[in-house]
Amino acid sequence: MANAPALSLSSTQHRFTIGLGEILNFAYDAFCSNKLQFTLTALAMAVGTASVILVATIGLTGKQYMLRQLQSIGTNMIYADYQGGAQRLDSTPDPMTVEDVQAVREQVPNVVAASPTVALEDHISVGAGKQSDILVLGVDPEYLRVRNLKVLAGRFFDSEDSSGRNKVAVITEKLAQKLYGSSPVAVSQIIKLSGGLPFTIVGVFKESVDTFGQSEIQEDTMLIPYTVSRFFVPTAAIYQIYFSAASPQDVIPATAAIKRVLQSRHRAESVYSVQNLTQFLTVAGRIADAMTLILMLVSFVTLLVSGIGIMNIMLATVTSRIREIGIRKAIGATNRAIRFQFLAEAILISLTGGIVGIVVGLAIPWSVRFLTDYRFPISGLSAIIAIVVSSVVGIIFGTVPATRASQLDPVESLRYE
């Protein structure tokens, strides 16, 4: 008697296994007997599933590109600007000085490089009797590191040039092409400002990312040592300083520390803006994620359309198999078994299309990896989401036809012609 419940449970499990196997066999037989209709429906599901994966890949690629562009400007870069005396309109200007740069170096250990900037508007001769406006920036040698600039020809001026107040300069690539035709030719040329002061061009540079003139560097820009630029301005005022933190993790604490140092060295009403690119990277990442989500929601519409196709084909299948349903019910099939049978057919169609779509959606980025050097980011999560959504679509849109089939009257079904 003690073994009776175990035998009963085993028997129940055995009957359930057989029932499930029969349901899957019926679903497979129905699939084989209507290959064209089911294949076309599964193909629509495959397109929808592949689109979800490809949209996620495109979104991740766009996000990666955007972040790389911003990071190329300088992930560790921090910049301080003098905003004036916000609380008192009649307050005396209290801009930053070179001593502030030195104080930050001494008091903020996370800062590994710094450079003040002095902007000068000038013009140079570009031909017989012709002149062109030019932006002259006085910077320290560490400006190269802080701004992550690329030297295309020659070199950047060093500490010896700065301490010796050598009249050397580096110019932008576009200015070099404008004046001399190419970057290599520009090196060692002499360029004279409006006052007649000559500067020897020792190098040609460009920004790591084209900022389209939205940074302090314009197309026609010449960089000279900060120590030399002091001869062109009447005061020691500095309105912008660039810093570089040791690592991306040090950027936020270093930003706060730099602001504290600057405020402590100046009047309370003076306002200094100390910012970094971290906030822009965060915002850019959120925008890219939002765009990816929106595009994925649009691609889900394709899956919904495919689900409607599944429902239509299953309703047509139910109509064409009414007599079969009546016979199955006459020999003992329950409404639940009939419902599971047609639901299994809908899920089989959606899963088949989903698997094919996943293969296609992953194969395209992988094939691009082999054909080019670019590595598209592939999201495994998107594949999981796609297969789950395709299964859910099959269940949702297969429920109506399955329920309709299970509720058919067996007597009327056998009379159906």
Image (spheres, rainbow, N blue to C red):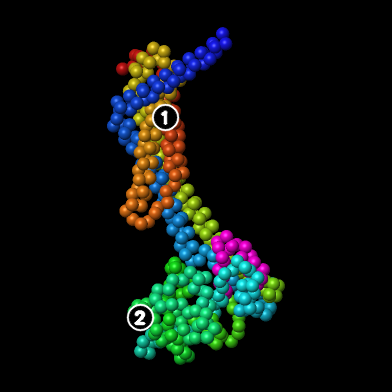
Q: Quadrant of the C terminus?
A: top left
Task: Choose between 56 and 149: the one closer to the eye.
Answer: 149
Residue drawn at the location 35% of the way across and 45% of the way down: 363
The first of marks 1 and 2 along the sequence is 2
Q: Residues within 10 Å of mark 2 (few under 14, many from 20)?
A: some
The residue labelled by disc 2 is 185
The residue labelled by disc 1 is 398
Looking at the magenta stretch, what is its main secondary structure?
Answer: helix
Q: Quadrant of the N terminus?
A: top right
Residue drawn at the location 40% of the way across and 22% of the way down: 21
The quadrant where residue 49 appears = top left
Residue 101 vs residue 389: left or right?
right
Q: Secondary structure at mark 1?
A: helix
Query: In the image, is residue 38 above or below residue 103?
Result: above
The quadrant where residue 277 appears = bottom right
Closer to viewer: mark 1 or mark 2: 2
Mark 1 and mark 2: Cα distance apart in space: 72 Å
Whole-percent x, y for residue 339 in the image: 43, 23
Give, as a single range, the part of the protein colored magenta: 240-262
- The answer to if 258 sits in the magenta stretch is yes
Whole-percent x, y for residue 372 in the image: 33, 55
Query: In the image, is residue 367 above or below residue 178?
Result: above
Q: Secondary structure at mark 2?
A: helix
The amino acid pointed to by label 2 is Val
- The answer to if 300 sits in the magenta stretch is no
Residue drawn at the location 29% of the way across and 26% of the way down: 33
Whole-percent x, y for residue 313 in the image: 35, 30
Query: In the image, is residue 250 above or below residue 331?
Result: below
The amino acid pointed to by label 1 is Gly
Q: Residues within 10 Å of mark 1 (few under 14, many from 20)?
A: many
In the image, farthest residue toward the right: 268
Q: Which mark is residue 389?
A: none
